[in-house]
Image (spheres, helix red, strand yellow):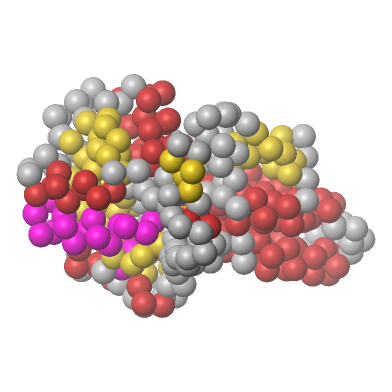
Amino acid sequence: MRTVDWQNNAVRLIDQRVLPGRFEVIDYTDYRELAKAITEMVVRGAPAIGAAGAFGMALAAQQSAARGRDGLLNDLAQAKAVLDAARPTAINLSWATNRVMTLAGHLVLPNPDDIRSAVLAEAQKIADEDVEINRRMAMHGAALIADGDTVLHHCNTGALATVDYGTALGAIRMAHEQGKRVHVLVDETRPRLQGARLTAWELKQLGVPFDLIADNAAGHFMYTGQVQAVFVGADRVAANGDVANKIGTYKLAVVAKENSVPFYVVAPTSTVDPSVPDGTHIPIEERPMDEVLGLETHGERVAPEGITARNPAFDVTPNRYVTAIVTENGVVRPPYGEGLRRAVRNV
Ligand code: MRU
């Protein structure tokens, strides 16, 4: 099933907080509850929260009691502000809500129910396109993987991080489906453990050979020549090719360059934000410290009580560490400015 879907007038999400222990879905009929679910990471991964945001706009349209076009557009604008604030770093969220809002604003339909239908149709289109875009990206990305390669992967960028299929993990999956022998080193990805919980769960089901590694082990594997490429996703790509992605990505990229290991970012053009000139302008979400302090082993908290922690959810990798950015419209190599502009315009 899809990670994000529209079923019986509700947004259906796979609850990623409880995987892999339990597979549960939750239906949302209130856009405010959906925004909370995005913040709490019931759904996570840039393209998946983009699709969730688009469906959130459809919920808002459905919830709105407005009897005229202007009233409905006002309600949609309010919902957009709530949804966009749910997670600040991934640009896909506001990209998707903008797309729905722009469509609604351009419609000259006097009957608000027709606008409601058009909003839902646009959200569904965003979700359907995501799956198709992922497959195109995966084709380009898989071409960068040779038979017998071991690739290192951070966070979760698979079907769970998208509507279906995946970005960086999609490329790895495609290489495997093409019959290449590919082995994956899966970073656990502290503190939320998206690698240990979600990527491991996905790869196990797909039958892709992998080993889970502690985040701290990545440097060792690169230094000892056991990694042929690093594959990651992105939450936002600046106009100059700086990349915001899951915390820890920057460290991986620096070590990759030091060891001449190619570092590939796989991201749809909806993740490119031409309005930010470089990575220093990308807002970095800082999440609750409990995500760091709450780690338990043998039912006991690891960290002492009464201490504080810092928990940035993302970091920025400067473009000089990025070998290539794989989009649905092709592989972009440095210098990134013009290449990314062309990829976004698909020319
Ligand atoms: O905090 P998360 O789990 O939403 O972070 C996800 C990532 O950092 C992914 O690498 C990124 O969103 C790309 S997902 C295809």
Q: Position of residue 301 (x, y in %)?
A: 48, 48
Q: Residue at x 43, y 40 (%)?
A: 297
Quadrant of the rendering where the C terminus is positioned: bottom left
Residue 165 location, x and y as percent?
44, 36
| Quadrant position of residue 338 | bottom left
Question: In the picture shown, does residue 89 fall above or below 324?
Answer: below
Q: Nearer the viewer, residue 57 or 246?
A: 246
Q: In which quarter of the image is residue 271?
A: bottom left
Percent across and percent down for residue 253 are 22, 58
Residue at figure coordinates x 72%, y 39% from the top left:
27
Instruction: State the residue in front, 110 or 88.
Output: 88
Seen at 73% across and 52% down, the residue is: 33
**Magenta stretch?**
242-261
Can you give x and y, in whole percent of width and height, for residue 28 in the image? Answer: 73, 44
Q: Which of 167 and 154 is in front in this view?
A: 154
Residue nearest the observer in this picture, 286 or 13:
286
- Whether residue 147 is in magenta: the answer is no
Quarter assignment of residue 32 = bottom right
Q: Residue at x 14, y 29 (%)?
A: 148
Determine if the magenta segment contains residue 258: yes
Residue 78 visible in this rendered orientation of the protein: yes
Location of the N terminus (image quadrant): top right
Is residue 194 at least partly visible in the picture? no
Q: Is residue 261 above or below residue 67?
A: above
Q: Is residue 7 above or below residue 295?
A: above
